Image (spheres, helix red, strand yellow):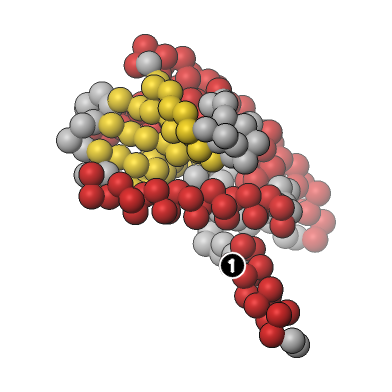
Amino acid sequence: MERRDQIEALFKGLVEGKPYTKKIPLNRLSISGLSFSADQEIKRKLGEKEDTLKDKLNMFRGTALHAHIQNLVKDQGYRAEYRLYHSIPHTWHYMGFDTIDFVGVIDLLHDERNEAIELKSSMNSDKIEEYHKTQLASYLKMLQEKTGREYTGLVVKFGGSDVVAEEIQRDDVPKYWDTIVRRAIMVADKLDEEMERRDILASTSNSKSGGLYKFDDSEQD
């Protein structure tokens, strides 16, 4: 293999990354996934969503930009990649869970200012989308449940030609959170039904769906 090919393979490997092998409970749902699309979250949990190299390249660019920005502002009191969990009661009739567990990762959190920032990037658009606001508003709700404090939330987007920011109005947080909860319940019920259907189909070969840890390939949010 020529050196050029070796270099190309090296950096393509960085983009593609290593497969995620941890087993994650089926009832743990991603806030970012739910914010974007309930159908996409279902496909992700069932292992039916495959990212192309182009998809992975876009994610790599975004991740690299996030990491660079997070490093630049750390001396201003921000914490990066703050992970949040929150549960709501929900009965899974087939899988046996009694909760839906949400997971989210806040890009930047400033405890003294009670401020959360969600970073977004795009090479094509300067617009802050509705799902960006849904995602951050849900994080604000989870923060309030965890800490008992109200946080200010801003989406900051590094777009195709500009840097734009939009604040989440606190009065809008319940609306966005209700959207997430409704989608999560729909996703949970569809996953529950699909696990039962697959086990029925597999019953002739005496193989089960894998229990409570089926198909989830990523804990990234």
Quadrant, the N terminus = bottom right
Name above or below for residue 174 compared with residue 105.
above
Residue 190 place in picture, x, y as percent:
67, 33
Residue 213 place in picture, x, y as percent:
56, 54
Which residue: 62% across, 70% down? 11
Residue 125 place in picture, x, y as percent:
62, 32
Residue 99 place in picture, x, y as percent:
46, 36
In the rendered image, the residue lying farthest to the left is 112
Which residue: 77% across, 53% down? 203
Q: Residues within 10 Å of mark 1 (few under 14, many from 20)?
A: few
Report the residue marked by disc 1: 14
Q: Considering depth in this image, is 216 or 166 the residue closer to the camera? A: 166
Q: In which quarter of the image is residue 94?
A: top right
Which residue: 39% across, 43% down? 107
Name above or below for residue 28 compared with residue 16.
above
Which residue: 81% across, 49% down? 201
In the rendered image, the residue lying farthest to the front is 161
Is any part of residue 215 visible from this angle?
no
Q: Is residue 84 left or right of residue 199?
A: left
Q: In which quarter of the image is residue 117?
A: top left
Q: Is residue 147 left or right of residue 174?
A: left
> Dot 1 lies on which element?
helix
Is any part of residue 205 visible from this angle?
yes
